């Protein structure tokens, strides 16, 4: 969408279709994408995965894994309910002249309480407009 301030990039059509396809058109929107103070990893799950990978057994019938998949679906539905709150939310690429490129990066050393892996992230802004970002849990233990 173009305006006198710049160009707004959003995925309103996709968001509205997703809300409809999931069947949440009549549901209330959520104020946050995730519930506050909830961890997305479980000690039991991590221990089961580590044990099974050592034994190289098939995890298809693992009840803990099924619970995790169910939880992930609930989290995904919560994110869709959050997107329902403002489906036109997007990134504004400002019309102002581009004067600077700003990059922020950070690393949380061993921040995952279960795996002790570090999380690194970065944000890139071009003239005050967000153009790229990423957050990633490292593969190796700190």
Image (cartoon, rainbow, N blue to C red):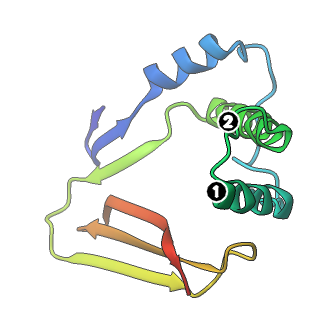
At horizontal 50% and vertical 40% (from top left) the residue drawn is 89
For label 2, count other residues whose C-alpha is less than 10 Å away and answer few (under 14), some (14-19) or many (20+). Answer: some
Image coordinates of residue 91 in percent, x first then y, are 38, 48
**Residue 8 sits above or below residue 18 on the image:** below
Going from N to C along the chain, the mark reached first, 1 or 2, is 1
Q: Secondary structure at mark 2?
A: helix
97 relative position to 77: left or right: left
- Image quarter where the C terminus lies is bottom right
Residue 59: x %, y % from top left:
70, 40
Query: What is the distance, in whole Å, between disc 1 and disc 2 at their CAs?
Result: 27 Å
Residue that mark 2 sits on: 76
| Viewer-nearest of discs 1 and 2 | 1
The correct choice, above or below, for 13 with respect to 60 in the image is: above
**Residue 118 position in % (x across, y down):** 55, 80
Q: Quadrant of the N terminus?
A: top left
Q: In the visual, does 84 lie left or right of 71? A: left
Which of the numbered marks, if any, corresponds to residue 87? none
Position above or below: 45 against 139: above
Residue at the location (39% across, 72% down)? 122
Residue at image x 67%, y 36%?
A: 76
Q: Position of residue 110 (x, y in %)?
A: 62, 84
Q: Which residue is more in the foreground, 48 or 83?
A: 48
Which quadrant of the structure image shows residue 37? bottom right
- The residue shown at (42%, 30%) is 11
Locate residue 87 relative to residue 12 in the image: left or right: right
Where is residue 61, by image quadrant? top right
The residue closer to the viewer here, 83 or 60, is 60
Image check: 88 left or right of 105?
right
Q: Are marks 1 and 2 in contact (CB under 8 Å)?
A: no
Point out which mark residue 53 bears: 1
């Amino acid at each position: 969408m173009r305006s006198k301030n710049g160009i707004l990039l959003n995925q309103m059509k996709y968001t509205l279709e997703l809300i409809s396809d999931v069947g949440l058109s009549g549901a209330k929107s959520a104020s946050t994408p995730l519930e506050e103070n909830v961890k997305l990893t479980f000690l039991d799950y991590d221990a089961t995965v580590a044990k099974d990978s050592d034994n190289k057994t098939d995890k298809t019938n693992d009840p803990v894994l099924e619970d995790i998949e169910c939880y992930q679906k609930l989290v995904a539905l919560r994110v869709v309910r959050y997107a329902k709150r403002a489906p036109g939310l997007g990134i504004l690429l400002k019309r102002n002249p581009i004067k600077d490129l700003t990059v922020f990066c950070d690393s949380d050393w061993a921040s995952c309480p279960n795996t002790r892996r570090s999380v690194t992230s970065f944000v890139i802004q071009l003239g005050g407009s967000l153009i790229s970002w990423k957050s990633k849990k490292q593969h190796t233990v700190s």
